[in-house]
Image: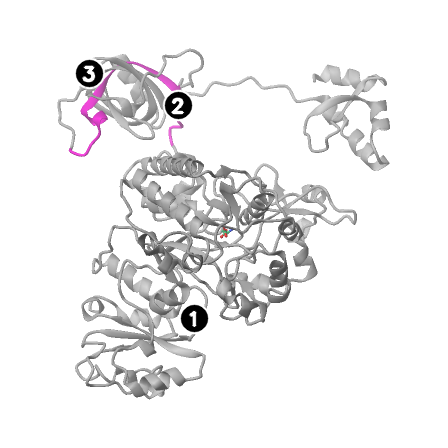
């Protein structure tokens, strides 16, 4: 609206006033007769608010537009007609010898060989081509353009005289003789850094200018790989009869396990208290409701999930899961009811329900490996119950690519029968676990520094004289009074190192001390070239986790000393343990919970769910001891179970991690377009940011910080 129109509007009592449209969230202004506004709106306060918008400033309209000044130096972005691109740079090859082509890309390098010969490199996200310019006018132009400018080049494809290096691509066999150039968009003369150069800029700078860093070919390739894997997954699951369904991002808070992100709304409740959405930590409840509805017997989604887990190594507050759920999955081991066949010995090892989930996931993973890596993964993936994994590898995500086992001392091979009895009859809830690093590997390790970092770990170096008495050299084993049977071959040889640590007999949580040490030793040995890991992926299912735990630090903020679910509250117990559970013998009850592990990293997890509302309600009330407020957060789920929900189960795979592994990337940040830092900060968009008190008020929120100490730079949203 022009200023003159605005003043006319002010002057005229019957004029249209500009107010917000009737939708309070809609930013569009639309004309409404002032008198109508008075009649149509509710309370006096809200009328006042609406009419306040028709202030003189609003009606004065925008300030006059300053004419645009061209940038200095004569380099301008091109607008209007231009030659049509005929090929992507990656499509150029000797097959096009002599043909005229038009390509677009970023100017990567400039080199003057002589007055009449200049060389340039033009890059796209996947390729680069050498430009040869013999025409003075073109050369002068191209030499003027700042590096990283966007250029359109018309030229003739010529086979290069110099042979390309082996392993290079078809485009390296040719060069483009420049006929004409168009500067589509000049870059600044100095950029924060120059991608695709051997000297890599520091990480912070790259993170802040991610759009520039993404110009690096390997990052671009990672994003393309990510898209390819997503496509394979979608096609595979569609072929298996799954339906992709999007579930809400603005959800409600529920005490499921992880810390949530809250989103304040501008709709306070009747008491004026602020109200919030919570972003989903996973679409767990929506997917169970979908299955309960009967409409979608096989659901999947590439789901965005949000967890407020700050400061975790290689985790992101927002991430993507391949999330799926199926109706009618089995609720017991395939052997129990004869279902499921026994291909590859599946029956003998799986041990719980959810066979259909295992089949779908193994099929999907095999397809991904075949299409991305060209590798056939043979047979069923290995399966290991949780307690075996903890006993033998000291981890619930064991890296099975290398040997070196963490075992309770009772497994030491040359214990005498007497010792064994002593250990078996010992009533203490604790035991000592041991792990042996063989002499050949121990030689290259700084043993003392490994132990020095961890006060829970002791070690004994084995020499000629203590192969059968080393147990007396450790403060952890000496008090046990063990005597080895010298007639038995010793478990150790001179030069070996025996590591020792105390732990609970029934292992808890995700790691034992030696389990962590085992991985640290492996990483150090690999770094020093003392150990080579097999290239073949080692997939492994861990099953039969304890259903409840007191030992999950991540959940203690919710549990407050109560039991928490190892997976989540909807996980079904193994039916063999149901009786114990109902009798309240919670410790030792195993869940129908399965995690998929790849080379020591958890890549997914899921479970068979509780479909029986009575059991679900009882678990929540009596075992997890949720209070009324917490129970109310699950009302809809309990109601859905009451309406006739089929038995069901599902899983979620960490999509970012899976792609990172496939890409050989060190961090999941390398496969996410705009990742956050370890502390959850987005360096490009600079979130999270502070909101002004004025904005907070709209959400019925006030800042605990004194307003006078906190000013918000309006344009940056930063607290200063
Ligand atoms: N929602 C679970 C998770 O995010 C996966 C599942 O149980 O399906 O770990």
Pick the residue in front: 283 or 41.
283
Tell me where residue 223 appears, x and y as whole percent: 38, 37
Name above or below for residue 371 compared with residue 532.
Answer: above
Q: For the magenta stretch, what is the residue range?
A: 166-190
Q: Which residue lies at the image location 78% right of the left edge and 31% below the top edge?
A: 50
The disc, 2 or 3, on the residue closer to the chain's N-terminal end is 3
Tell me where residue 295 appears, x and y as whole percent: 57, 39
Tell me where residue 190 appears, x and y as whole percent: 38, 31
In terms of image quadrants, where is residue 520? bottom left
Q: Is residue 490 left or right of residue 708?
A: left
Dot 2: what SS?
A: loop
Q: Is residue 50 left or right of residue 435?
A: right
Q: Is residue 229 magenta?
A: no
Label 3, label 1: how many angstroms apart (C-alpha)?
Answer: 68 Å
Q: Which residue position holds label 2? A: 186
Q: Residue furthest top?
A: 81
In terms of image quadrants, where is residue 519? bottom left
The crowd level at tag 2 (other Cα within 10 Å; few <14, some 14-19, many 20+) is: many
Pick the residue in front: 111 or 262.
262
The crowd level at tag 1 (other Cα within 10 Å; few <14, some 14-19, many 20+) is: many
Q: Which residue position holds label 3? A: 97
Q: Is residue 167 magenta?
A: yes
Q: Which residue position holds label 1? A: 507
Dot 3: what SS?
A: loop
Q: Is residue 125 left or right of residue 4?
A: left
The disc, 3 or 1, on the residue closer to the chain's N-terminal end is 3
Name above or below for residue 57 compared with residue 615.
Answer: above
Q: Which residue lies at the image location 24% right of the left edge and 67% below the top edge?
A: 445
């Amino acid at each position: 609206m022009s200023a003159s129109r605005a003043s006319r509007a002010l002057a005229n009592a019957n004029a249209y006033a500009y107010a917000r449209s009737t939708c309070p969230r809609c930013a569009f202004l639309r004309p409404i007769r002032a008198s109508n506004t008075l009649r149509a709106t509710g309370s006096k306060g809200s009328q006042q608010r609406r009419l306040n918008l028709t202030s003189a400033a609003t009606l004065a309209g925008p300030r006059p537009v300053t004419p645009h000044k061209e940038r200095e130096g004569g380099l301008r972005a091109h607008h209007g007609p231009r030659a049509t691109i005929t090929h992507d740079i990656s499509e150029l090859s000797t097959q096009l010898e002599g043909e005229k082509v038009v390509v677009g890309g970023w100017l990567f390098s400039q080199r003057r060989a002589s007055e009449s010969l200049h060389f340039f490199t033009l890059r796209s996200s996947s390729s680069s081509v050498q430009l040869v310019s013999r025409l003075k006018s073109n050369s002068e132009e191209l030499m003027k353009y700042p590096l990283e400018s966007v250029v359109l080049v018309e030229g003739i494809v010529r086979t290069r005289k110099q042979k390309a290096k082996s392993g290079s691509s078809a485009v390296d066999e040719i060069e483009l003789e420049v006929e004409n150039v168009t500067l589509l968009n000049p870059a600044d003369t100095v950029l924060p850094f120059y991608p695709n150069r051997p000297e890599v800029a520091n990480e912070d700078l790259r993170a802040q200018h991610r759009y520039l860093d993404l110009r690096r070919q390997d990052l671009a390739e990672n994003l393309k790989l990510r898209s390819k894997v997503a496509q394979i997954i979608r096609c595979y699951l569609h072929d298996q009869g799954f339906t992709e369904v999007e579930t809400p991002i603005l959800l409600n808070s529920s005490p499921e396990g992880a810390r949530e992100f809250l989103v304040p709304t501008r709709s306070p409740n009747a008491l004026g208290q602020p109200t919030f959405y919570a972003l989903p930590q996973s679409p767990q409840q929506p997917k169970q409701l979908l299955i309960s509805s009967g409409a979608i017997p096989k659901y999947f989604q590439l789901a965005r999930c949000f967890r407020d887990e700050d400061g975790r190594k290689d985790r992101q507050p927002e991430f993507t899961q391949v999330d799926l759920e199926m109706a009618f999955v089995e609720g017991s081991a395939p052997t129990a009811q004869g279902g499921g066949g026994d291909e590859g010995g599946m029956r003998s090892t799986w041990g719980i329900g959810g066979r259909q989930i295992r089949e779908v996931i193994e099929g999907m993973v095999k397809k991904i490996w075949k299409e991305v890596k060209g590798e056939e993964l043979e047979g069923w993936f290995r399966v290991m119950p949780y307690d075996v994994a903890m006993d033998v590898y000291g981890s619930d995500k064991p890296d099975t690519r290398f040997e070196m086992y963490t075992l309770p001392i009772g497994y030491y091979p040359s214990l005498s029968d007497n010792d064994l009895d002593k250990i078996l009859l010992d009533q203490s809830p604790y035991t000592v676990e041991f792990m042996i690093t063989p002499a050949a590997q121990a030689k290259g390790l700084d043993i003392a520094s490994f132990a020095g970092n961890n006060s829970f770990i002791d070690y004994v170096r084995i020499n000629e004289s203590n192969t059968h008495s080393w147990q007396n050299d450790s403060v952890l084993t000496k008090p046990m009074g063990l005597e080895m049977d010298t007639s038995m071959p010793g478990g150790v040889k001179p030069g070996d190192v025996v590591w020792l640590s105390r732990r609970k007999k029934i292992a808890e949580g995700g790691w034992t001390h030696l389990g962590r040490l085992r991985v640290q030793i492996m990483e150090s040995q690999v770094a020093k070239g003392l150990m080579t890991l097999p290239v073949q992926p080692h997939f492994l299912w861990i099953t039969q986790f304890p259903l409840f735990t007191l030992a999950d630090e991540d959940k203690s903020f919710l549990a407050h000393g109560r039991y928490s679910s190892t997976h989540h509250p909807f996980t079904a117990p193994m039916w063999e343990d149901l009786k114990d559970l109902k009798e309240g013998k919670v410790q030792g009850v195993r869940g129908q919970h399965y995690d998929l592990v790849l080379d020591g990293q958890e890549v997914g997890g899921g479970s068979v769910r509780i479909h029986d509302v009575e059991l679900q309600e009882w678990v929540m009330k009596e075992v997890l001891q949720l209070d009324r407020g917490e129970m109310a957060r699950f009302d809809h789920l309990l109601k859905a179970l009451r309406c006739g929900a089929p038995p069901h189960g599902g899983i979620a795979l960490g999509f970012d991690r899976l792609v990172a592994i496939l890409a050989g990337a060190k961090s999941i940040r390398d496969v996410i377009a705009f990742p956050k830092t370890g502390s959850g900060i987005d360096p490009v968009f600079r979130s999270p940011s502070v909101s002004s008190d004025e904005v907070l008020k709209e959400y019925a929120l006030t800042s605990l910080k004194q307003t006078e100490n906190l000013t918000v730079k309006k344009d940056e949203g930063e607290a200063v």
